[in-house]
Image: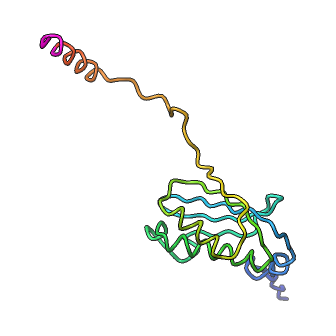
Amino acid sequence: MTKAIPKIILRRNRCIGSRKGARRIPKRVIHVQASFNNTIVIVIDVLGQVVSWSFGGTSRFKGTRRGKPFAAQTAITNAIRIVVDQGMQQAEVLINGPSLERDAKLRDIHQSGILLNFIRDVTPMPHNGCRPPKKTYIELNIEEISREIKDSMI
């Protein structure tokens, strides 16, 4: 007697498209994390659930090319195209990171036809930063010698 082979249902074979198309929320929040190496775009709804996401690696850019402006532009258009088809009309944009092409990323979001309610920079800024390391013994001796030289010149 042979045993029946159980069917293995792979994750990629399941149909989840109908679930994503059912959500019709006109207002969303777009998070853009722009670093020097990559750009991550996440679109969430008002409840905080992720609706769409994209970054330079999913747009078929590998290595150092993920940090280029064109990779960021394609990541933004890929993430926003999905939510525009679902009926997004208004958005709030939160930008995080020290990237140089932040203006271009905002222009790409604006050109997609979405009304931007507000744009906020949420990059963390240090308040006087971390405590510096203590001075080494050599630095202390150099300061004493330089003081002695200044005193002898006067």
Displayed quadrant of residue 10: bottom right
Closer to us: 151 or 21? 151
Residue sitting farthest toward the left: 153
* Image position, residue 55 (x, y; %): 59, 68
Residue 30 is covered by the magenta coloring: no
Point out the image quarter for the C terminus: top left
- Residue 138: image location, x then y, percent: 25, 23
Instruction: Please identify the dominant SS of the magenta region.
Output: helix
Q: Is residue 5 left or right of residue 79?
A: right
Q: Quadrant where the N terminus lies?
A: bottom right
Residue 21, image quadrant = bottom right
Q: Residue at x 46, y 69 (%)?
A: 68
Q: Position of residue 109 (x, y in %)?
A: 63, 70
Instruction: Indicate the quadrant where residue 20 lies.
Output: bottom right
Pick whichever, 138 or 116, lies toward us: 116
| Residue 151 shown in magenta | yes
